[in-house]
Image (cartoon, helix red, strand yellow):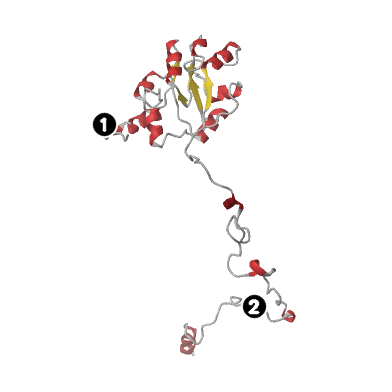
Amino acid sequence: MSLARAATSRVRLFNLTPAANSQHAQKRLGRGQGSGRGGTSGRGHNGQKSRSGNGKPKAGFEGGQTPIIKLFPKRGFVNPNAKVYAAVNLDRIQHWIDQGRLSCSPENPITAKELFLSGCIHDVHDGIKLLGDGGSALKAPIHITPSRASKSAIRAVEKLGGSVFCKYYNPLALRDCVKGNTERTQAAPTKRNDILWYTSWKNRGYLSPEALSKMPVVEDRWKELSKQFLMYKEQGIEQQK
């Protein structure tokens, strides 16, 4: 008796059954109104939205007529990598200093935050660019850290004993600078043009060896980035023209 029970407890083809409640009766669609699933057969709409598949046309589809995006002519070119800098001239900075709305020191230079909060600029855009217009009106030495600076502005500022160090800001780092957030690690330049710019002392880039030796406040991370970015010179790799 025990042998018979042991034999029947094994998994055989004749004793295989589906698990409880694992099978459901198939819906028989479109069998008339009396079935409860006639008419639109549970799809709810007629036409395009009741068909199989996604049922949604791609963006810009206007039912077959010429979409508006094709009706408008396309002219010119929009550079997706272009940057718009907030330009500020030296005479404007001097005027703000005379009014007591700006102040600076080598340890606390003028950044996008001070320019924006003081009203010297109305929008930081993609960064601050220091221009040399009104350089003759500059009286006091200023210390400023913009994103870019013209050569005439650098000469005018350094002539009076000031300093200009250009620093890279991506959109997130620029927003943290304006809001005074210091919790995040600021991004480093990744594009070739930006790396060449900010590692050049001619542009007063903050990652150039000369700038790292003269800046009063230098992060250890900047020294390591400068070493890695300037490694191509030691390897003898020529710059692309």
Q: Amino acid at mark 1?
A: Glu
Quarter residue 97 falls in: top right
Viewer-nearest residue: 177 or 93: 93
Viewer-nearest residue: 207 or 58: 58
Under circle 1, the secondary element is helix
Q: Position of residue 175 (x, y in %)?
A: 55, 32
Q: Is residue 49 above or below residue 206?
A: below
Does 239 sit left or right of 23 as displayed?
left
Q: Position of residue 183 (x, y in %)?
A: 52, 32
Residue picked out by circle 2: 27
Task: Say which residue appears at 62% left-offset and 59% top-offset.
Answer: 65
Circle number at residue 39: none
Does 9 sit left or right of 59 as displayed?
left
Q: Position of residue 90 (x, y in %)?
A: 51, 16
Q: How many marks?
A: 2
Q: Amino acid at mark 2?
A: Lys
Q: Quadrant of the C terminus?
A: top left
* Name of the residue lying farthest toward the right: 34
The crowd level at tag 1 (other Cα within 10 Å; few <14, some 14-19, many 20+) is few
Task: Say which residue appears at 47% left-offset and 16% top-offset.
Answer: 106
The crowd level at tag 2 (other Cα within 10 Å; few <14, some 14-19, many 20+) is few
Task: Say which residue appears at 43% left-offset and 11% top-offset.
Answer: 159
Tell me, yes or no, whether the two marked residues, 2 and 1, touch with CB atoms within 8 Å. no
Q: Position of residue 209 (x, y in %)?
A: 34, 24
Report how far apart the C-alphas of labels 2 and 1 lie in the structure. Answer: 74 Å
Under circle 2, the secondary element is loop
Residue picked out by circle 1: 234
Q: Is residue 13 above or below residue 166?
A: below
Label located before the other in sequence (2 or 1): 2
Quarter residue 166 falls in: top left
